[in-house]
Each structure stands twice: as C-alpha cells, then as structure tokens.
Amino acid sequence: MTQKKSHSAPVLFPRRHLLTCEGLSADEITVLLDLADQAADHIRQGGRKRDVLAGRTLINLFFESSTRTQASFEMAGKRLGADVMNMNVATSSVTKGETLIDTAVTLNAMRPDIIVVRHHAAGAVELLSQKVDCSVINAGDGAHQHPTQALLDALTIRRAKGRIAGLTVAICGDILHSRVARSNINLLNTLGARVRIIAPSTLLPSAPERLGAEVFTDMWKGLEGCDIVMMLRLQRERMDASYVPSVREFFHFFGLDHEKLARAKPDALVMHPGPMNRGVEIASTIADHSRSVIREQVEMGVAVRMAVLEALSAHLTRYEGAA
Amino acid sequence: MKSASKSLEKTKITGAATVYINARLIDPASNRDEPGGLLVKDGLIADLGAHLRRNAPDGATVIDCKGHVLAPGLIDAQVFAGEPGYEHRETLKTASHAAAAGGVTSIVVMPETDPVIDSVALVDFIQRRARDNALVHVHTMAAMTKGLKGEEMSEIGLLKRAGAIAFSNGKSSLANTRVMRNVLNYAKDFGALVVHHTEDPFLSGSAAMNSGEVASRLGLPGASKLAETITLERDVRLVEMTGGRYHAATISCAESLDVVRDAKRRKLPVTCGVSINHLTLNENDIGSYRTFFKVRPPLRREEDRMAMVRGIASGDIDVIVSSHDPQDADTKRRPFAEAADGAVGLETLLAAALRLVHSGDMSLITMLKALTINPARLLGLHSGRLAKGAIADLVLFDPGEPWVVNKDTLRSRSKNTPFDEAKMQGRVLRTVVAGVAVYEYAGVERT
C-alpha cells in the first residue's frame, strides 16, 4: 500500500513551519502521511512513547478555544517525548491589550522549539511565524487554513480507500467560514482527488469555482456518485446573521440524512471534523453509522500531528546546527 | 348581487360543457384578438377559435357573449387580505368575492397579516381557508424575513415547498443591504422570486405623501421619489451580484422606470409592477386631505403617472396590480398624516385599467397582457391564457358600458376606494374560475 519511510529522513520535508496546505507538493504531503501512517500503526500496536522530541519544548498557543485540536497536539507532543505547555490565552496578557507581535516576541525570548497556534484572524499565524525563531504549526487561523485537519482527513481516506487520487470528495455545509474546507480543497486537489463543494449560496465564498472545486447548491445532485462525504460544522451564530433561516431548514436541505446519503456511492464514507451538531448538519444515526469514519479521524489526528512534529523537529535540528 | 354570486356557488357544475359563442376573444399570450367562441369542459378550455363563433356543440350550455370581450381571468399579484388578524377589514372570502366581481380569477395575498405569513403552518392555513371559502384562486406571498422585520431570513426553501408563490417584505423595504443580498442569494438556490417594495425607510421617514408643491401647500411631510429609486438601484446591483430573480412590486416614478429598463437591457432577471392607482391617479387627487388617496408608494405627479402609462404601453412595466388594501374608518378617518396607507381596488381594477385604453394610450390587448399572461409568467402560474387544455379562468366584459362607482355596493368588507362616484367605462359581465361562473352581472342573459 504505502511505502514506509525511515524515521530519520528530515530532508524529505524541507519546511520550517506548517502554515498552509496551499503550495504543499504531493511529495511533501506523502512524506507526512507515510510518517503518520507508521505512527498510527505504532500507537495501535500499543507502542510506547518515543523520544524524538525529548528535551524539546512545545507551546500550544490557542487564542480560540479548542478541545480536540489542543488535546491532540498535546498528546502527539507527549508521545514524542516533548515538554508541552498549554498557554491559556483567555487569561493571559493578550486580554490586557498586548498585540499579537508582542506576544510572539515575548514567547520567542523563552526559546521554545515549536509553537502550535490557533487564532481567530486569518493570517495571524503566518504573521507570528515571521517574528519567532522556532517552528510554527498553524492549528487554524480564521477561515483560512487548518493544515493538520486536512492531513488527518487525507490519512483517514487513504487508509480506508487505499488511495486518494481519482476519488470524488464532497465537502458540504458552511464553506464560507471554513478553514477546514479551504485546507481540504488545496490538499485533496494536490493529491488528485475531484473535489465538490455543496452549500447554499449564502455560505459559499465569492468566486467559489476558482478555489478548485465543482460547486453545487443542491445537495442531492452534489452527492451523486461521491466516494467521500465530508460534513462541516454549522455555527449557530450563522443563523442570526441570516446566512440560513433556521436549523430546521438547513437540515432539510443541507443536513446529511439517509435519503441524501443514498445519492452517494454505496461504499461512500462519511466524515466530520467535529464537534458535530447532531440534527443540524448531520443526522444522529449517520454520525454513528458503520460508514462514518468520524472516530478514525480523531485517531488519525494524533498520528498526523506526531508526523508533523517529527518532520519539523528533524528540520529544526539542522537549522540549529547550521546557526 | 351578493346573493347572485352565492346562488352560483351552490350550482357549481362540473363535467358539463359550456360554450361561449359570439365573443371577441382576446388572448395576450398568443396575440389573439378575433371574433370566435370558446368551449369549456371539465374546468378546462377544450377548444376555442373562430369556428365556435356561432356553432355550439350538442349538449353544451350556450352563453351568448353578444360580441363582448372574453379574455383570460385577471391575475392580481398584490392583494392585502386581512386574514388572519384583520378580518374586520377583509377576509379571504370577502376579498375573493370582490375579485370575482372585478373579473379577477387569481389573487396573491400578501404576508402582512397578524401573525405574519412567515411559517409553513401559516401558508397551509391560508391555502386551507382559501380552498374552503374563496371563489377565486388564492396564492400566498410569504414573508422573506421573519416577522417582516428585515433582520432574519425566513425559511424560504420550506415555505416554497409548502406552496408560497413568491417572497416579499410587505409594505416595508429591507434597509439592511446585507440581509437583502443574502435573501436574493439564498432565494436563487430555490428558484424563488423576491418581490420588493422599494422605499428607503430613512429617506422617506414619516412622510405622508409625495414631496413637492402639493405637499408643501398642504403642510404635509413629503417623501422624495428618490427613496424609491435609490433602493431600486441598490437592489439591481444586488441582483447583478447574486443572480437572484427580482420583482419591484410597485414602482411609481419615471426614474424608477429608467432603472428597470436599464436592468432589463442588461439582461438581469428584473421585472416590475405598478399599481392601478399610480396609472390612473396623481397627487392632485388628494385635494383637501382625502385619505382614501393615501397609498404606498404615494401618488406622484402627473408626469410620473404618464411615465407609468407609457411603461405599460411599451412593456417595460410587466404587471398591473390592484394593491387592494382594505382599511376601515379606524385607520382612515384620521388626519391625513396619521391615516393608514391603502386603497381597495379589486372590483374596480379592470374598469380603471380600461381608462388607459379609452384614453388611447394603449390597445386593449396590451393592457390585458399586464393583467394576465405577464403575472402568470412571473409567478409561474399556468393560467392567464386562452389555450386548449388551459384552466378555464375567464372574464367576460363589455369594455364600453358606462357606470358609476358606489362604494356602498362594493363587495369588499372595507370601502376605502379612491374611485367612489367615479365614472367608469367597462363592466365585468361574468367571471369564470376553473369553468365555474363565480360572478355574473345581472344584465347578462343565458340562452
């Protein structure tokens, strides 16, 4: 299936940061997925904690609350032997008026090795990465990118289907506000999948067809013949802002139920980045269905983050050595 | 006359054939205006043409039209019925009786009721009440925002599936451009038509009438027609951006007509309507604070009225509506600025529209186009045409007969007509809905 790569192959991923899926080559993605595949198997086989990041410091800097992504990075870092520090930004100096750049400079002075950042503003993570000497991983910036989510989605698909090239993947729901959608469109296109996006026009960004996806506003049509149905979370506040009229109407036309899922291929898989709104974008029975790989996505999340940390840390060593 | 239509209700016959002979058939959809006859069977038009002018098929009931006009029943795309909530002003039943007497066979009722028609349950309610009580077809215009508040979009997809024919914000404009954009964008996905009353609420403020000389003399706060045109121009830009289908409910001034004409030239999915009031009346009719002439948009200057008439003649304005809006003494017998807007208009719609024909401004077929096939196409109705297999919704009228409007004999529960004691020329003789006569003028003979 996948070609196993040696653990000590840092040159195969020559980037210092992981900020976006846009511009990642198929080779770079494959290196990360192969590493993650090994990590996943290692964990499944009850493998013990490794020491790739022993003596390294990882800071989780989350300006936006998150449970699963933060826990996933923490778990990944600890499995690789890193010292993990979670910065609770809500109670930090940020609320006292410190700018993002000042925060970055302050943290940099503490000489961490890797910073994982989530921020509500698109572009904030890249801005921060320009002000620090360590590696930066984007754990979600506004509606822009969430690269490790796209990687874990790709790994989940590859393990379930054996390939990604040639598959038809439908991403459904609030595309407009979704970093998950943007990251997946980039990454899946690079890997040769055919990507569709399905949403009401009010939840599509402008010029959606230019993103590299086929656009549907009719979910029944959009799911026709799909291999993968990837649902997105709809945030409640979207209703107040009149993007969609009601939960009931949204579920009726854009929620994944058995009737709509029947339009996809019989062996189509259902995915969701979580946390799910049961009965809003996905019927409860589908979330728990045998075709749902939502739990696997969480599992692959840790493996993918281990792979990313490992790849970046190897590079970090070289970087420090050169300095 | 009320009893006449009631007795007709009881004698609803289906299956039997009726032939209308010796008629002047006018069908704007096929550009037909010729002497002929028309055969109705099972509620549908079974046959029509010159060959039926004198020959009645055996067994059919024969109606001699005596050379009068037989046309598709009128479709009125803007009717404010009072049900639910304002039944003391009008019910679906009384509105339908008024419609039948005016030759109107389909009405679109507006969502400005209490409660507002913004939920599937209320669309069901209207349809059920109409089915049980109304003489004519009743279609529901649903609210495009919840409670008509202009803030949150209503359930356009579910409402359309429940039977809402189009979406409107009633007598108020969506001031929030973002919400308007979202509505147009969202409605487009469902192929839903957005019908908008265009009036910038901040600009028109608490205006009582058109701003200008008359308002200045009367000491009334005036609304600039720009309030209408500016909102319309904004909407056209949003249509251009979103591609949503858009209909300006009732324009009233030359500048608005220019905007619509330009949008059509650019092939945008934009149409517009005008109320019969703005085709036949102007601000001078308000005289000494006559509140029955207080309508929305306000009556404009004569130049604007003439522009509206030319718009119908040229086809740039698509539909004529009655904008039938029943108001009672409570809301109308007040100082002008405090009185409610609105005028009843269903029963006088055809006669008032015939003024435009008698004045030589347009042909009869052109006028009827804006009351039959154009609203039918706009709303996606299969009526509004004389064709084999089409539903037999018909109006038989004498375009020449003179009469005088008497508000006390109106069937509408409210009597706020601006045409009280007005001389009219043109009388509805018979109105047929799905093959069944729902109104018959006492003068017509059966043979």
Image: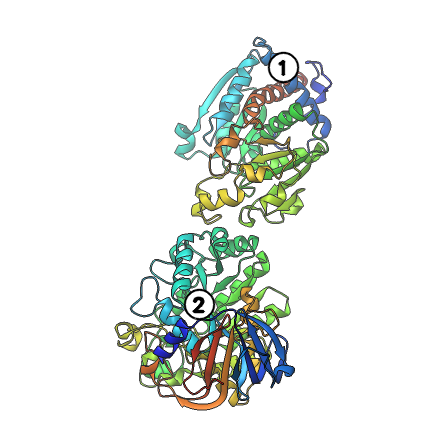
Residue B239 image position (x, y, % from top left): 56, 60
Task: For mark 2, name the chain.
Answer: B
Quadrant in the picture for residue B32: bottom right
- The residue shown at (26%, 72%) is B330
Q: What amino acid is at disc 2?
A: Glu
Categorize mark 2 by other alpha carbons within 10 Å: few (<14), some (14-19), many (20+).
many
Residue B296 visible in this rendered orientation of the protein: no
Marks 1 and 2 sit apart, C-alpha to C-alpha, by 66 Å
Residue sitting nearer the eye, B353 or A127? B353
- Within 10 Å of the Cα at label 1, are there few (<14), some (14-19), or many (20+) other Cα atoms? few
* Residue A172's disc number: none
Q: Is any atom of residue B203 visible in this view?
A: yes
**Numbered circle sitting on residue B199:** 2
Residue A228: image location, x then y, percent = 63, 33
What residue lies at 57% left-to-right and 46% top-to-bottom? A204
Q: Which residue is mark 1?
A: A41
**Residue furthest toward the front?**
B59
In the foreground, B318 or A42: B318
